[in-house]
Image: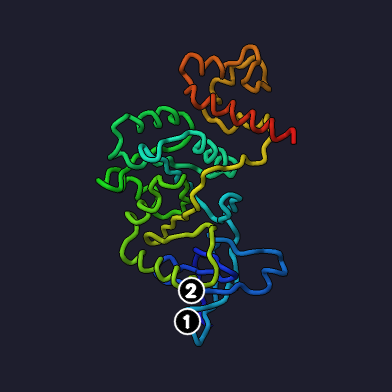
Amino acid sequence: MEKLQGKIIRGVGGFYYVHDGQRTVVECRARGGFRLRDMKPLVGDNAEIVLTEEDPGSGRIETIFPRKNELIRPAVANVDQALIVVSAQHPAFHPGLLDRFLLWMSFQDVPVIVGISKTDLDDEGKEEEIRSLYRQAGVRILSFSAVNGQGIRELEAMLRGTTTVLAGASGVGKSTLLNCLMTDQAMETAALSAKLGRGRHTTRHAEIFCWDKDSFLCDTPGFTALELPEIGEEQLRYYYEEFRGPEQQCAFRDCLHLKEKGCAVRKAAADGTLPVGRYESYCRLLEELRARKKY
């Protein structure tokens, strides 16, 4: 029996598609023992499979190796980082959705790159506005354009050799970026994966593309809204990197940075040393957590 190790890049209707990190994709069923252990294979799992003798293009998942991590939203394993794409133009940038993405990734302990797309269309200074808003947020920020190639090589260097979750609202250019990164060989492999899964069931779940050797991008459905993770209102402030400096000077250790006397975070937002947009975002999310708690 020939064995192969690879990464699960797609799951459709009980079938899993395992990529060897080069160009081979194998359609697999999972061994029954996983069900007995109440363990479901996830996109992103590193697995060992046994190839079917009569059909080397199919096989059976024998082993799922220990997971580095397991994300809740999206449901994917072994993620190294997240690339959250926002657009400098068309669609207009709305910080609320990005703030929710950042909260989810921080909650799941995933480092973030904020990618500002369509900079070739930016004639209103939106790129610098976004950078200023998130400069203290503990994330890397990279601007790029798939049209003129600006920033693409730098982005490739950040993504190479990693499994990266790609997220962002519909229309920000995720698909264009994928096409820009994918080599001819990678596009052939992606087409094969889609062909193998076509006709079984449609899926709205995460799917991984191998765009270079051992370099994977996990595409997720376009989100227009995200519920907040299960955290308490007193925990939210810990997910705002910008607060860590000022809050050391707050009069009260358990300060929620709303109406408390001697709040250094509110003072920093008022005098401009902390981006007021991020403070306002925090206040909105805090009120949402409080409203959810009532129900």
- What type is the residue that disc 1 sits on? Pro
For the residues labelled 1 and 2, say whether their Cβ atoms are less than 8 Å apart: yes
User: Would residue 116 be seen by someone viewing this image from the given angle?
Assistant: no
Most extreme residue toward the right, as rendered?
Answer: 295
Q: Pinpoint residue 38: horizontal percent, then vertical percent.
A: 71, 64
Instruction: Identify the residue at image location x=25%, y=45%.
Output: 148
Q: Secondary structure at mark 1?
A: strand
Q: How many marks?
A: 2
Q: Is residue 234 above or below residue 24?
A: above
Residue 128 placement, left or right of 42: left
Q: Pinpoint residue 159: horizontal percent, then vertical percent.
A: 40, 50
According to the image, label 1 marks what residue? 56
- For the C terminus, which image quadrant? top right
**What is the spatial separation of the Cα atoms under label 1 and label 2, in whole angstroms?**
8 Å
According to the image, label 2 marks what residue? 26
Instruction: Identify the residue at image location x=69%, y=69%.
Output: 35
Q: Is residue 73 above or below residue 102?
A: below
Instruction: Identify the residue at image location x=38%, y=59%.
Output: 211
User: Would residue 217 be seen by someone viewing this image from the given angle?
Assistant: yes
- For the N terminus, which image quadrant? bottom right
**Mark 1 / mark 2, whichever is N-terminal:** 2
Instruction: Identify the residue at image location x=59%, y=57%.
Output: 67
Circle 2 packing at 10 Å, graded few (<14), some (14-19), many (20+), is many
